[in-house]
Image (cartoon, grey):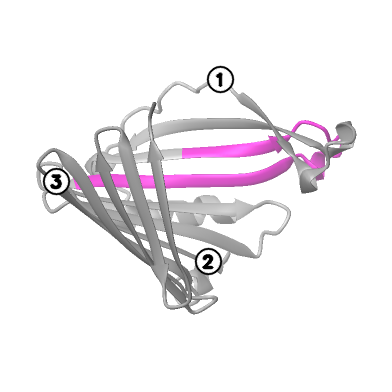
Amino acid sequence: MKLIKLLSAASLSIAGVSAGGPSAPPAASTRPQLSITIRDGNFTDFDGLEPTITWENSQQLPNEVDFRYGIDLSARTTNLASLPRRIWGRASRRFAADRYSLSTRLDMDVQRMDRVDFQIDAADEDNDLKLTMFGSAAASLKRFATSPRVSHVEFTKGFDNDGNRITINPRYNVNYDHMDVVMTYDADDTLITVTASKDDQEVTISQQL
């Protein structure tokens, strides 16, 4: 399948090695999970329910790359072509004595197999810094490397201050050309969240009783 080939390419890119190395045996399959969502906010009857069966598994690839993958299946349809909803896979690896981490996740809507959504996460644990990037690309090996389009980018920088936690999270939505910053201050049982952009500012204070 297209996504499997693309996931393999992403996994090898993180591993930095060819596929010729030894691989560990696959992990045992996890039990399927059943989740139910409400479609379009319709609570009037059972037609608004969207029961979904989720199955996932994991495997250790060469160069200590963790590979997780799964599929979401519709529990209502009797049409085999409409049964699979979404397939996904995530390849992750840690570097430099677990200081740095990098992971790539690919998602494909089985009913719309012309596009692959991706998420890239990178972190520097020593500096308490994280990067997250979302986007999409054509579901073709020939076009995948040349057609990615980033839709959202954000950084999170954390600080510890006398036992309290401070984070600064600038975010940029490429599609809407919108930027804002989320700042949090977590002190004991009180969390203060400030969301600020050039057009709006919002302050939320929550306290655990």
Q: Amino acid at mark 2?
A: Ser
Q: Nearer the viewer, mark 3 or mark 1?
A: 3
Left-right relation of 123 to 177: left
- Image side of residue 35 versus residue 143, left or right: right
Horizontal and vertical percent position of residue 137: 53, 68
Mark 2 or mark 3, which has the lower sequence index? 2
Identify the residue under disc 1. Answer: 31
Residue that label 3 marks: 160
Secondary structure beneath dot 1 equals loop
Q: Which residues are magenta?
A: 69-94
Pick the front one: 51 or 183: 183
- The local secondary structure at tag 2 comes to strand
Pick whichever, 150 or 139, lies toward us.
Answer: 150
Q: Which mark is residue 136?
A: 2
The image position of residue 182, as x and y in percent, is 36, 60
Dot 3: element: strand
CA distance for labels 2 and 3: 35 Å
